[in-house]
Amino acid sequence: MDSEDDMHDANDLESLDDDFYSGETAMGSDDGDADYDFVDNESDGSEDITSHRQQQNYTILSEAGIRQHQEEDINRVSTVLSISRSAAFILLRYYNWSVSKVHDEWFADEENVRKAIGLLENPVEMLNARELTCGICFENYPRNNMSAAACGHHFCGACWRGYISTSISDGPGCLMLRCPDPSCGAAAGEDMINVLATDEDKKKYSRYFLRSYIEDNRKTKWCPAPGCEFAVEFVMGSGSYDVCCNCSYNFCWNCTEEAHRPVDCGTVAKWILKNSAESENMNWILANSKPCPKCKRPIEKNQGCMHITCTPPCKFEFCWLCLGAWSEHGERTGGFYACNRYEAAKQEGVYDESERRREMAKNSLERYTHYYERWATNQSSRQKALADLHSMQTEKLEKLSDRQSQPESQLKFIIEAWLQIVECRRVLKWTYAYGFYLPEHEHAKRQFFEYLQGEAESGLERLHQCAEKELQVYLDAETPMKEFNDFRTKLAGLTSVTRNYFENLVRALETGLNDVGSTNSQATCSKTSSSKTLGGKSKSGKIKAAGTSSRSGGPNRSLDESNLWSCDQCTYANPRSTNTCQMCEHRRIMFHDAGKNVFLIASYVEC
């Protein structure tokens, strides 16, 4: 059971309403300003978080960097295999720029590799004659006007240029150019292109040559941002797929969509398809319209009586409720605003199936609209935050430096806050796609997810308001304000705790909220709850204070607010008469906060 030290630790928490999103940073203050008074990260896992932030498992490549990597690979293969630079390029291109694959295949079966790529071991010289006949145009030319690949099949300069130009115009296939002779498969490499091609064709070939290194190489990709010419070299199997290009665009390496943690690529693909698919249009039509009984065109009724007239050329008049001909309706059937036939038929179950389908479509549409609107709203907020960040970097930071007599190097905490806001808006946006595909039957997991999402929104709004509205006071000030240092501490503190919370939230969602059990069976209680992972630390790991607050109604509350208490582990609402969660068997204990004159709840797990 719990020790007296644990109880004292819980009583020392004086600012519980701000502890919910502190990540794994302990917070405390004797003067009541616990929001922004920080101690060093000494909790378990803080070093992992720092290393996670600093870890970068990719390299951004400019055009010069791409060419340098390309030349290094070509020179390495050329040196090890003792072949020409042109032959090394053909080999690397054939094996998708994998140096190790080239070495493995070459030393396993050199003869077969040479045959596959058209690389002759013993080149054939052209015939030693004064004049030779071109194998394409069949004209005679002096020997020095003829050219041949390693196979010795000679063709005139004009025919070679035409052949090369046509191949380059056809696309990147020109990088694996072969001898023009239909019966020959000898490779015609880069050295022949440089000698025989026109300047314009050389530029095109050089561009294909560069692109090949990125597009054929499984370790590299182009940044998908419009107009960006940077490429990314990625270290596979080394953590997150998130990449931030030098153009400031964030994207997922795996699917090249915008960065979407904590949602997996499959869910993102389904969500994007759903947003663009016609299925939602059909759902809307099914939920909000009925087909004309005669011509079957869908009709929307948004006001008026039940007497409907279809548009020309149909012009059929019918009752909206029962879809019967209006000529059979009148006062005897209920008048213009009711239909006795419909009510009677409905009671007999005639309309059960169609009404059920319409109701299901309406519910599905409403649910999708709920998540999509919030997804889109956070996307808009992120775009606005990006614009504000740009404005801060280009204009306002200099102005603030002048107004508050602070060097710009001392104001970087504001830029960090805005960068964090942009990132958190992105994460929060994708949590709505995550929530949409969360299985409906996992009620405990859904409740816990919605609670965590609400806490994330609350914390982000506080940071956003501080960086946007509270900063404006100091931008408008005519003279330096002594409160600016307090503002610096506050904004830096909010940035830190919000970052911690969102990093932990992302990790929790990526693991599928595994700490929360299914509602169909009693969940087994883990020693480290999800709330503890996302919230502050306790010294023993057994007691977790739960006096947090949330706009969406957090699971922990004072006892005088309700006849129920919500479990800190799974958010299940339990009656006040029990001290053990009926869902996950998490225990709660109560202790009195004399300063606030309320009873606070803390939950713990028996070891």
Image (tube, rainbow, N blue to C red):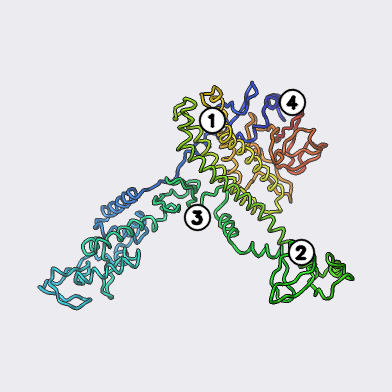
Name the quarter where the N terminus is drawn: top right
Q: Nearer the viewer, residue 126 or 496?
A: 496
The residue carrying mark 3 is 255
Which amino acid, by three-letter code, is at mark 3? Answer: Cys
Q: Secondary structure at mark 3?
A: loop
Which amino acid, by three-letter code, is at mark 1? Answer: Asp
**Mark toward the viewer: 3 or 1:** 1
The residue carrying mark 4 is 596
In three-dimensional space, the C-alpha distance between marks 3 and 4, rounded to whole angstroms, equals 51 Å
543 with respect to 502 (left or right): right
Can you name the residue that lies furthest to the left here? 130
The residue carrying mark 1 is 476
Answer whether labels 3 and 1 touch (C-beta < 8 Å).
no
Answer whether labels 4 and 2 touch (C-beta < 8 Å).
no
Which amino acid, by three-letter code, is at mark 4? Answer: Lys
Quarter residue 56 falls in? top left
In three-dimensional space, the C-alpha distance between marks 4 and 2, rounded to whole angstroms, equals 52 Å
Residue at 51%, 24% (x, y): give it.
479
Residue 510 visible: no
Answer whether labels 3 and 4 touch (C-beta < 8 Å).
no
